[in-house]
Image: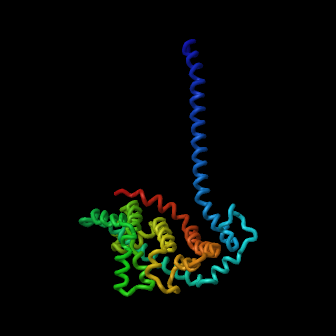
Amino acid sequence: MTDATRTGSISTAPTVRRTAMRKATRERLGKAATYLILSVLCVATVLPFLWTISSSLKGPGEVFDYPPRWIPHPAHWENFTTAWNRVPFGRFLLNSTFIACSVVFLRLLTSSLAAYAFARMRFPGRDAMFMLYLGTLMIPGQVTIIPRFILIRYLHWLDTYTAMILPGAFSAFGTFLLRQFFLTLPYELEDAARIDGCSRLGVYWHIILPLSRPALVALGIFTFEGEWNSFLWPLIVANNPLKMPVQVGLAFFRGMYSTEWEIMLAGTLIALIPTLIVFAAGQRYFTKGIALSGLGGR
């Protein structure tokens, strides 16, 4: 190695080190900024929930105290008992559970059957029909409320569980979600089952559904939480308090001249428990189902 080459190597080494240090510094700053933004978003998300817990334990009139007290003293745990006993809260919870579970079962059934047809069967106009089916997602739900109400009244289903269950049994989003997942399943499994004499319905029941558990759980969680939190449609079609779901029942805590917000918030927390249980039970499959449902493209 000549003196000129050795001198050039020595002079470029500090430059390489400085470049590497600047790159590492930029990466650390980028990570720090990312963590800071995520922390702010996390606090903004959790803060209303913490305020709800705090306010549910306050006394009359303390919800609007300024400056607000995050730790109520003393804590009024009797607010939960009052919320439970003031209205038929247990009946509201049973109604919501029955309605939500019924809609989940029917939507999983109808969406999986439609998704199987769109994903695994070939027939003329399949793609055009699927695009038309997806086009219904562009129609706001508020547009169809009046036609649905007129139809429900014509069928004499007002103030019945059928009126609150059947309209939610069909979902274009659920069909799309399951179709995308079904497209990721190998066709060889279906061909092998058909060779062994399995029918179309048998392939759907014994092959497709068992392999689609993550997507089914994800759709089930979406559906359960959506139906559990549904307010407007049950408010329109249900007049009997014994058939109202819990979200409509919470409106009974709102008075004409005043509202006991601490009692209402206590009831809201009680109504929140089932959705947390459902999400915690299906969390293992939820992320996997969402991640895999967008990989199909055949």
* Res. 152 image quadrant: bottom left
Q: Position of residue 288 (x, y in %)?
A: 50, 60
Q: Quadrant of residue 20?
A: top right
Q: State whether residue 56 is above or below residue 35.
A: below
Nearest to the observer: residue 204 or residue 131:
131
Question: The C terminus is located in which quarter?
Answer: bottom left
The correct choice, above or below, for 163 with respect to 177 in the image is: below
In the image as oriented, which residue stretches furthest toward the left?
A: 124
Q: Is residue 191 visible in the rendered structure shown here?
A: no
Q: Nearer the viewer, residue 229 or 276?
A: 229
Judging depth in this view, the residue of 21 and 233 nearest the camera is 233
From the viewer's perspective, is 220 left or right of 43?
Answer: left
**Residue name at image x 47 percent, y 71 percent:** 223
Q: Residue at x 42, y 83 (%)?
A: 162
Say whether residue 143 is visible: yes
- The quadrant in which residue 139 appears is bottom left
Q: Is residue 67 left or right of residue 12?
A: right
User: 273 and 196: which one is in front?
Assistant: 273
